[in-house]
Amino acid sequence: MNTLDFIFQGKCFTASKGDSVAAALLNAGEYVLGERINGEQRGAFCGMGVCNECLVTINGQRGFRACMQIIKPGDVIEKESDRRHATLNQKTNTPKRLNEHAEILIVGAGPAGLTAAIKAKAAGVDVVVLDDREEPGGQYYKPRSIGFRGFHGLDRQHREGNRLREKAQKIGVRIYSGQTVWYARKEKDTFEIRSVSENRQFYIKALSVILCTGAFEVPKIIPGWTLPGVVTIGAAQTMVRRYGVIPSGKVLIAGNGPLGLQLAHEILRLGPRNITLAEKAAVNVNFQLLKAAFYCPRLMVDGAIYRWTTFKSKTSVLYNWEIEAILGTRRVEGALLSNLKTKEKRKIPCEFIAAGEGFSPQTELSRLLGVPVKIDPTTKQITPIRNSDCSTIIPNL
């Protein structure tokens, strides 16, 4: 049996093994996970543990990130109100502390982190990898959970991720999953990194550190963007690619780039859905597109497959449109779209919205370690200053 039962707000629901709490609740149609201090409803948003919008109470303990917490049989989950104070008699668990030493410590087990670890280990270096997910792979590979709901085979990204994980395991890379790094300092020639999970915490001293923490998705900040039922495109991809969870009702995907089209394709592979895709870019066949097709034909083939899926399903794909406002009172009820060329407005009824506005690098650890930052003139995002070989002014970082 790949299913389990849990309780949410006094009602019994069924989840698949390996589900995050957020995935199980989304699959059950429960989008509202708590209440802000101003009384507004909140729900899962980023899907990667950054925003803390999905905090819930589990078995009497507060402050669990629903998107990062794996659901267990019999879990009793409650919505969490930001207006309710924590009690002094709340039980706490002190994870077991483990001390480690490494020549190289890598933070992040996505494509970059796994590749760096494999290269270092193959060169005879003692390497340790910390990652906050329960399985290596990162936001790009998104390995399937044990209870994945779909029936179609693995795609190219999944297969690449599996090969990389198997290679890291075979070569003997030490990977500690489910670890949130909360402390980073350098004393003389040694880095000290501390991380914690539900059951254990690591204090690691390393001679060198490689940060492969990737990026988080920049939210589309418009009226209504904090309503339950609004998530980033990356969060929706995690639900679909990792857990096989597809939202109920009408879906709107709004963004700029290939991720929206890929998300529509992946949702439709799991089952028929009423989807509208609003793409900011126009359709232009120009020299840059032909150049991309020449140098990376595989990506062009992927794009053609995604577009064919939306065409077959008669999915509405709107080019040169962007989302201007999200409609609803306590959760998503629709969206207002705007045509970038004609300024035409259009209301779209929907119950679920995945929207994105690009990416921003996760700079928390580099800043803790003293790496200077700059504002990228194009994206307007904070980025660490580094050399062409990715080294920084901090030696061995």
Image (cartoon, grey):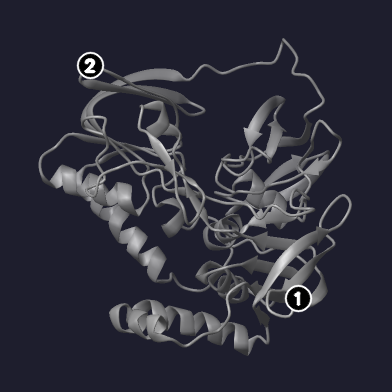
Quadrant location, the C terminus: top left
262 relative position to 206: left or right = right
Neighbours of disc 2 within 10 Å: few (<14), some (14-19), many (20+): few
Query: On the image, which quarter does residue 54 sit in?
Result: top right
Residue corresponding to mark 1: 343
Tell me the residue at 42%/48% (across/down).
214
Q: Residues within 10 Å of mark 1 (few under 14, many from 20)?
A: few
Mark 2 and mark 1: Cα distance apart in space:
58 Å
Q: Work out which residue is located at the far left of the displayed protein and give it.
A: 124
The residue positioned 52% from the left and 50% from the top of the image is: 380
The N terminus - image quarter: bottom right
Question: Furthest residue to the front?
Answer: 377
Q: Quadrant of residue 36?
A: top right
**Residue 25 x, y percent position in the rendering:** 71, 49
Query: At label 1, which amino acid type do we have?
Result: Lys
Up/down of 230 relative to 44, above or below: below
Q: Secondary structure at mark 1?
A: loop
Q: Which mark is residue 244?
A: none
The percent position of residue 277, horizontal first and vertical second, equals 66, 74
248 vs 8, nearest the viewer: 248
Left or right of 163 in this view: 77: right
> Which secondary structure lies at badge 2?
loop
Q: Which residue is mark 2?
A: 188
Q: Earlier in the sequence, mark 2 or mark 1?
A: 2
